[in-house]
Every structure is written in structure tokens, then in C-alpha cells.
Image (cartoon, helix red, strand yellow):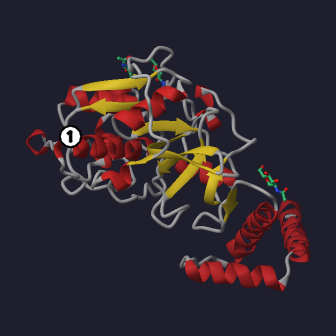
Amino acid sequence: MIMKSVVLLVFAFASVTSAFHLSEQDEFHFKLWMTQHNKVYSMREYDQRLQVFTDHKRRIDKHNEGNHSFTMALNQFSDMTFSEFRESFLWSEPQNCSATRGNYFSSNGPYPDSIDWRKKGNYVTDVKNQGSCGSCWTFSTTGCLESVTAIATRRLVPLSEQQLVDCAQDFNNHGCNGGLPSQAFEYIMYNKGLMTEQDYPYKAVEGICLYKPQLAAAFVKDVMNITAYDEMGMVDAVATRNPVSLAFEVTSDFMHYDKGVYTSTECHNTADKVNHAVLAVGYGEENGSPYWIVKNSWGPNWGIDGYFLIERGRNMCGLAACSSFPVV
Ligand SMILES: *[C@@H]1O[C@H](CO)[C@@H](O)[C@H](O)[C@H]1NC(C)=O
Ligand SMILES: *[C@@H]1O[C@H](CO)[C@@H](O)[C@H](O)[C@H]1NC(C)=O
Ligand SMILES: *[C@@H]1O[C@H](CO)[C@@H](O)[C@H](O)[C@H]1NC(C)=O
């Protein structure tokens, strides 16, 4: 009985204090966002989500009033705390990702000032959505293999993430709990094939391996690991060959990225801290600031139509710690 009333008291206190900080305006913005994102909550959860949302909104507004190279905006993640977000979308433990000596050798240029594989031809598939599963590494892998294959064959075919989620464990990959593109390319090479998205569709949960060799649609002959922290090696590969898989550390300031060149003082830059894999499809420079053009896997409504720009040349958030691509 005593426990129960203490709990009730804490609840009552919590809702009074949060109500005190929140205005009608805040609630108006939240309800609008709820409608836009088709959200429904229980009475109890409503208060809690309203508080989380409002904290994000204040941070976003404050950031956008400052002089930053990128802006933030509300998006589908705005009712989640960063730890909930990390739990659902990012790796929880470090992956074995540092190739201290890679096997990719740069050509030493010269390199164009900018390149965008989306504009060079039909080489990049539409942005996909990983859902609540730490399977970013599979999207980085398919995205890269789709592009490398399309550049070689002139045929762009969406490939299966689910096969990698279900079947690539023997190569230190862990389904919805993380993995690495380099290890996934190794799996595809030894497995002798990857099926198409259509034949092995994405489910965002781990299941048993349903690979059918007769439906193999894409192949890997060799895996190129770019030496850890050799960001010029990445430039070389993207300029002279194809898009490149990379990993970096996502911190709370990235969740609400909107547009512009992302830079952070919150993230680290070492291989043991990276927690998200994506695909560099090009690079460029804006008012003297060099950036990468990166394809994400959080759907087309996040960031710039599903893409983001991130500072290039300083190993921002460890983005040069473990990059790789397949040879087909
Ligand atoms: C904003 O930042 C840019 C680059 O950091 C700088 O060149 C510019 O002077 C700043 N503008 C203001 C108003 O502080
Ligand atoms: C790293 O590699 C070792 C040795 O192959 C393996 O036992 C371990 O599970 C790997 N860690 C991850 C997170 O894959
Ligand atoms: C590339 O990296 C993968 C895993 O990260 C590793 O298994 C493979 O041996 C590496 N390849 C080379 C040629 O170093």
C-alpha cells in the first residue's frame, strides 16, 4: 500500500511539473506532428511523448537560430528519446571494423571536384527503410553492390537485405544487432550469390535463412577494404570506381538532420565508436566546405529525400574508419 501511494505521488508530481513547462503552443505543435505521422498514444504515453517531442523541438529551434552548416527539422523520430532511437536503429556494440591495412590502392588522381553517381546514369536504387532493426549494414551492402553491379552491367536491380539479415551470421554479422558491409561482401562472395529484393523481401526481423542458389542475382568476386582513416582512398574509389560503403558514429544531433553539411562536436572518430553503416554516392564542395553525399536507410522522408551531406576531409564521426566495396 505504501509503495503504491508513493508511486502515485511520483506520477502526480511528474505530470504537474511537465505540465508546468509545456504551453498550449507546444501541445498544438505536437498534435499537428501526430496527425502528420499518424501517431496514436494511450493517455499515459501521451504526456511522456509530448515532453520528449517538446524537448526535441526546442533543441531544433535553438540549433536553427544559430549559425550552423546544417539545419535540423522534426521528423518521424521526434517522439523518441535518443536512447530509444539508438536501441531501435543503431549497433549496440562495437563491430570489428578497422582494416589497419586495407587492400585497396589509390590511383593518386587527379580527381574531379565533385561527383554524384545518381546523376551519372541509372546506378543508384531508391532510398529504402530499415524499420526498427539494426540492419543498416545490410542496406549499405545492397546499396553498394547494386551500384557496382549496375556500373558493370548497366542493369540496376534492388537486392535483398533480408538474405543478409537471415543468412550472413558466419561472417560475424548479427542480423538486427549489427554487422559490417565488408563482412557481408565476404559472405556474398563465399555464398556465391545474393538474391533480389523481390525474391527475398525485407521483413525487419530476423528469420531462418531462405536462400535459393538458383535465384542468385548478384555476385562478388573480391572485397576491397580501404585502409582505416584513409579518407583520400575513399575519394579515389568514389571518383574513379563506384559508391563506397562506410560507417560512422550517429549521435543525438544527427537524428533530426534536415539539410546542409553535417558536422558535429558530439561524435567521436574512432572505429570502436561507429554505429551506423551507409553509402557514399558522391562528394562535392559548397562555399569552400567539402562534403560527402550519403545515402541513408531511414526512408525517403528523412533528411534530403533520404540522403545527407557530411563534412569531408576530417574523418568526421569516424566515417573513414571502415569503408569498403565489392568487385563484381
Ligand atoms: C557563420 O559561420 C560562417 C562559417 O563558419 C562564418 O563565415 C560567418 O561569418 C558566420 N556568420 C555569422 C553571422 O556569425
Ligand atoms: C569480432 O571478431 C571475433 C573473432 O572473429 C569474433 O569472435 C567476435 O564475435 C567479433 N565481434 C563482432 C561484434 O562481430
Ligand atoms: C576485408 O575485411 C573483411 C572483414 O572486415 C575481412 O574478413 C577480409 O579479410 C578483409 N579483406 C582483405 C583482403 O583484407
Quadrant of ligand 1 in image: bottom right
In this picture, residue 73 sits left or right of residue 171: right
In this picture, residue 317 sits left or right of residue 123: right
Closer to the camera, 53 or 314? Answer: 314
Q: Is residue 105 above or below residue 165?
A: above
Q: Where residue 65 sits: x, y (%)?
A: 81, 65
Q: Is residue 326 above or below residue 126?
A: above
Q: Where residue 197 sits: x, y (%)?
A: 25, 54
Residue lying at the far top of the rendered structure: 101
In the structure shown, which secondary structural element does the residue marked by tag 1 occupy?
helix
In this picture, residue 277 sits left or right of residue 153: right
Residue matched to label 1: 152
- The residue shown at (36%, 32%) is 325
Closer to the camera, 289 or 28? Answer: 289
Identify the image quadrant of residue 192: top left
Residue 106 in sight in this render:
yes
Label 1, ligand 3: CB separation under 8 Å = no
Q: Residues within 10 Å of mark 1 (few under 14, many from 20)?
A: few
Residue lying at the far left of the rendered structure: 214
- The residue shown at (74%, 42%) is 266
- The residue shown at (64%, 37%) is 317
Q: Where residue 328 sits: x, y (%)?
A: 22, 33
Q: Amino acid at mark 1?
A: Ala
Q: Where residue 97 sits: x, y (%)?
A: 50, 25
In this picture, residue 272 sits left or right of residue 252: left
Q: Is residue 199 above or below residue 273?
A: below
Q: Which part of the image, by quadrant, shows the N terminus?
A: bottom right
